[in-house]
Amino acid sequence: MRSAVIVFPGSNREMDMVAALEQASGRKPALVWHKDSELPEVDLIVLPGGFSHGDYLRAGAMAANSPVMNEVRRRAEKGVPVLGVCNGFQILTEARLLPGALMRNASLRFVCRNVTLRVENAQTLFTGALEAGQRMTVPCAHMDGNYFADDDTLKRLEDTGGVAFRYVDAAGETTDEANPNGSRDSIAGVFNETKTVLGLMPHPEDAVDPLHGGTEGRALFAGIVKALS
Amino acid sequence: MTEITPEIVAEHGLKPEEYDKVLEIMGREPNLVELGIFSVMWSEHCSYKSSKVWLKKLPTTGPQVICGPGENAGVVDLGDGLAAIFKIESHNHPSFIEPYQGAATGVGGILRDVFTMGARPIMNLNALRFGSPEHPKTRHLLSGVVAGIGGYGNCVGIPTVAGEVNFHPAYDGNILVNAMTVGLAPADRIFYSAAAGAGNPVVYVGSKTGRDGIHGATMASAEFGEDSEEKRPTVQVGDPFTEKLLIEACLELMATDAIVAIQDMGAAGLTSSSFEMASKGGVGVELELDRVPLREEGMTPYEIMLSESQERMLMVLKPGREELARGIFEKWDLDFAVIGRLTETGKMVLKWHGEVAGELPIDPLALASPEYERPWTASEPPAPLDAAALPERDPLEALERLVGSPDLASRRWIWEQYDHLVMGNTVLRPGADAGVVRLPDLPEGSRKGLAATVDCTPRYCLADPVQGGRQAIAEACRNLYAVGARPLAVTNNLNFGNPEKPAIMGQLVGCLQGMGEACRALDAPVVSGNVSLYNETEGRAILPTPTIGAIGLVEDVARVPGAAFPEAGLSLVLIGETRGALGQSLYLRELESREEGAPPPVDLEAERLAGELVLALIGEGRVAACHDLSDGGLLVAAAEMAMAGNLGCSLEPPAQDADQAAAKTPLAAWLFGEDQGRYLLATADAEAVLAAARGAGVPAARIGETGGDALTLAGAGTISVARLRRAHEGWMPAYMAAELAAD
């Protein structure tokens, strides 16, 4: 699997993502600067975590208008898979490649802690190697991860398998305590209509090594590599 | 032109005798720009005039030291061609006035000190002291400081891996915010600040210069009075996004051969950076101030020289490398301006639209920087505590109160606001004895890591400055040993009251004496540091707080033990000697409301032997969990290990020998005494551990084992881990939630 990781000014988890992708695919991803207007031929485009443009204005708002995003959008329209994690998810919603918006955490505080995710749709190229209902514990680290969409959008997401992951407790149930940011319906990640674009707030790339304190993020990357190789 | 009156001199924080020296050096009356420069260069903050004499007595060298005090940060050799660059620095006064920005810019400043020398920052730490929880400002200050530290560190993408927090009424009017950064650099690519090469261009990069922070260094060198809130305009505003770009741009430029010297613009901004670079290099400098990128209109040379706007650096480049450097900074959308040249005159010449706005001799000003041997008096040694006279209490009830008390309660509410995982190298998360990150880009097969911790027990320092100074170093090293790291070196942040008072000066002298003794005994030289004096409000001083930041090398990150009990059926072994020192203990303070007695003495040789033993046992893979014993003593340590692992244990206090029994040491002293040099280990092989301890001449005893869902103390009963957790985890969220309710 060939992949590219986009670097925006203020990206700060691009190397975490590079390490996870390289571990899963055996190939070093290309790093692409946000002012570039071209992208190499790749099987997967990744928007990493961080604070692009300092989160000034709104998280992801300025990065969504970076020169490189024109090409990301063109590739996405052609069906090239795009993964956005944390700030990458925020950028994808600002770029309207994913529905909804990410608001300030309900606590109004940054939150960095382990969360447990439940796979909601295992019929996609991203999640095909996982099982519906499968749980994985990975960290989250964000200030603006409170997923919001209007009722119609939520219903459409629900009806079409658009919800990728939910925050759940150890028993697999959605609860207020298990939801780190107040997201509607405990939504942690969503797909676009064609299930070729995935955004999620938590960081599976920071749970791929026993030294991270957990390796449950590996399955997601392994599955993506399997689907795209 | 403004006439220099005695009032103006006083407003600049210069004493009349210091002003006489100014006149002597200048050979004439200075203008306002020049006076401002003298003022900041001779401020306590920049000149260390009260502490210099004593700082010189600290050990600062060793085979591991590449660069000791005097540069932006200390540099230590890690082997494998790598060096650690680190320092701790205070931002106390600004954080009290404006907690979010004060703390945020404290993080920004210490990050710059480290990446200025060529290092990529890999971990942040912080040591915070707040006033009494009951003080009406404490919640506001705590929430603002924590949000500011997180807001800055999270955005630049450096994990905040460890820290400490204390509450005490002595900090009601002067909180302490000490921030530490550790960075990693190639050992042969360290960048220094000494300018060289007449004619070489002086280059300004980073953010534009505004009016923020003018005279911050002078403010940080004065006591607070009733008007301290009016000083808000002297607090700088941070922009972590620009800092992130500055880190990347500087490291990109540092990979070329363009830089001769580089220095961040910290306290006293352009003045101290240009002055120090020229002074260290023995050269002159000519600056054209009208070329400095400005954020505001109508700024004067005085304001430009004294602004403490953040995220700015000053560099001397090799001739002809300007365009290469400009290209890199423009790529990152940062300002870049050639603002002057080095000269051979030995003078600093400031030009403003072609006119000379100031001209000062560099060496005389730097060399004549005041140095005081202030009078001091040693603290009276406290009367020893009669522990046998203390009332008897149920030890498990006392434990529950202690783990839920402000100084011992969980700090999760704080560190969950810090991104402690970014960069993907964090091995031990906050809440452990020390933060540990694995070193990136090592040769195949190497699993080295770096551990870091911050420590100080101010109540010990007040009661006995010498023991307190020793203890701060000893505990920092103990925290490193406990995670399997060999201590390498330390950085210190000396927070004290007004040094013009002999009693305060005596605290400083005593703490430094103890610190020096411990650094020598534990082979941990001081390689960088910062001094923050005048932490007083209306005559009341803070507790003497010489915060220690220490780093240590981990040979194999896969063997780092956590504090959490990992499984049932492990033996608990207590390493070190327990005498039952309750003087100045948290038990005495929290249960008996008494802050008295002598602090536990620190036996440096015993400390070293116990540390080396623990390090060897961890290296042999015999340690399943390890925790150092400090605040709260043995029972609190056992409870913390149980809570971290969500697994209980049973404990039987070691038998007393005849002497101790004769001294009628109460049970509480055994359980809650804060004797130094001790660790609690969980191990599957107690016999091997005890044999190793005998061989090393370190007292050790098997005192219990892990298992169950409760902590059971022989002869005293049982308390569930869940109940302990409720007390431990509950205090801070409940305390901070009351802020929202009050709003």
Image: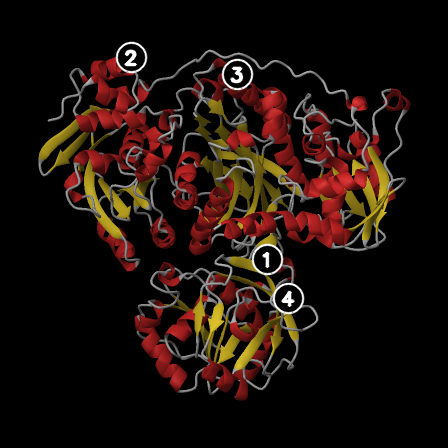
Residue at position x 22%, y 24% in the image = B35
Q: Along the polypeptide, which appears first: circle 1 or circle 2?
A: 2
- Residue A63 in view (yes/no): yes
Residue occupied by mark 1:
B444
Q: Along the polypeptide, which appears first: circle 3 or circle 2?
A: 2
Nearer to me, B46 or B328: B46
Q: What is the three-letter code of the residue carrying label 2?
A: Glu
Labels 4, 1: one chain:
no
Q: CA distance from mark 3 to mark 2?
A: 24 Å
Q: What is the three-letter code of the residue carrying label 4?
A: Thr
Q: Chain of mark 1?
A: B
x and y percent of residue B718 in the render?
A: 84, 47
- Left or right of B127 on screen, residue A87: left
x and y percent of residue B19 in the render?
A: 25, 16
Q: Up-down: is B93 above or below B462?
A: below
Q: CA distance from mark 1 to mark 2?
A: 62 Å
Label 4 residue SS: loop
Labels 3, 2: one chain:
yes
Residue occupied by mark 3:
B506
Residue occupied by mark 4:
A215
Nearer to me, B12 or A183: A183
State which mark lies toward you, 4 or 1: 4
Label 1 residue SS: loop
- Left or right of A134 on screen, residue B347: left
**CB within 8 Å, label 1 to label 3:** no
Q: Residues within 10 Å of mark 3 (few under 14, many from 20)?
A: many
Q: Chain of mark 4?
A: A
Q: Residues within 10 Å of mark 4 (few under 14, many from 20)?
A: some
Q: Could you tell me which quadrant the N terminus of chain B lies in?
A: top left
Q: CA distance from mark 4 to mark 1?
A: 21 Å
Residue occupied by mark 2:
B17
